[in-house]
Image (tube, rainbow, N blue to C red):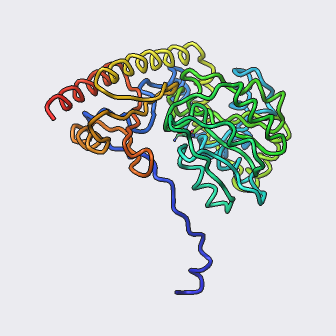
Amino acid sequence: MRTWEENIRKVVPYTPGEQPNQPDMIKLNTNENPYPPAPGVERALKEMSADTLRLYPDPTAGILVEAIAEAYHVEKDQVFVGVGSDDVLAMCFLTFFNGKKPILFPDITYSFYDVWAELFRIPYERPALDENFRIRKEDYFRENGGVVFPNPNAPTGVEMPLEDIEEILNHNQDAIVIVDEAYVDFGVQSALPLIDKYDNLLVVQTFSKSRSLAGMRIGYVFGNPVLIKYLNDVKYSFNSYTMNTAAIAAGVAAVRDKEYFEKTCSKIIETREWTKAELKKLGFSFGDSKSNFIFAAHETCPAEELFRALREQHIYVRYFPKGRTHNHLRITIGTREEMEKFLSFLKEYLKNR
Ligand code: PMP
């Protein structure tokens, strides 16, 4: 082995869901929103002159931070923005998880957490979900170097009530607690109101799901101004211009259109509840998802078989073959029409099998 090879930072990267590109596909594999972004987003992009791209963007993404602060009734110094919540979460790990004690996150959860922990050499432990795929809050009542979990959890979609989050916060006054609310707008109570009470709480959200802007890469975090300042110090030590000009303009337009946001979220919730009822009739079981996806197992047909059969029809869902999730499919909620096609294929397939 060459000496320089010993000095390489070797990592096992996160595997994102595939992005196939077939004209007839039904894409239910990466929790994207089936509806377009708010109409103002298109207008903002059309009005943007290419000449503005000569200039660096505002390093503070000031107008976006301001628009988010206004929409969520917080102060500007309680908001930090980044290139999708992946960037924001990575910055949080880098900034706040530097102790010797292990950080804690569930064994079944967003599979980027252990990748960042490995990348940044953060020790970690993963308390197991219970047999119903629920987070056991008591597992987070011990000494640790920080806590992070999504609410609702991914890929299970299961909600943790706000009282339980508050209990976790009360048991962790000496550690940073990150609640990853990527899917919060599909029916879960946000922990945002708790940031004034707990100065160790960070609440991360994204424009990728409920605001239909996965392709634009916009994420943000709420926390007390001291935490936000530390995040900015790390960001400016890494890359001053994370948010590009187009993303800033699109984000502002999206966050200002509350009516469109609420309308599309409720359509997805309605389709999700209808899909749950239909899946049940077909012999699927699942936790009570409060997200824009359902994590389901069939009573007789293995998930892997269904995954492949669906794929052949260009219907894409997500399958996590390793460990306890090997018999589940994560099905993103699409339009009602997409879900009808998906379900009618399943019905036929299961009947003729
Ligand atoms: N958190 C969770 C739980 C997610 O599922 C995702 C989506 N992969 C993200 C964060 C990151 O989303 P984005 O970077 O698009 O904001």
Q: Residue at x 72, y 32 (%)?
A: 65
Q: Nearer the viewer, residue 325 or 195?
A: 325
State left or right for residue 21 relative to residue 293. left
As drawn, the residue found furthest toward the bottom would be 2
State left or right for residue 194 relative to residue 226. left
Where is residue 68, by image quadrant? top right
Q: Residue at x 23, y 24 (%)?
A: 344
Residue 54, position as x, y percentages in the image: 62, 46
**Quarter containing the C terminus:** top left
Q: Nearer the viewer, residue 218 or 110?
A: 110
Residue 63, position as x, y percentages in the image: 71, 30
Decide: is 107 above or below 5. Answer: above
Decide: is 12 above or below 272. Answer: below
Question: Taking the image as four quarters, which one is ligand 1 found in?
Answer: top right
Where is residue 57, by image quadrant? top right
Decide: is 338 above or below 316. Answer: above
State left or right for residue 96 relative to residue 53. right
As drawn, the residue found furthest toward the front would be 131
Q: Nearer the viewer, residue 236 or 174?
A: 174
Residue 289, position as x, y percentages in the image: 49, 26
Counting labels gives: 0
Decide: is 158 above or below 277. Answer: below
Q: Nearer the viewer, residue 39 or 186?
A: 186
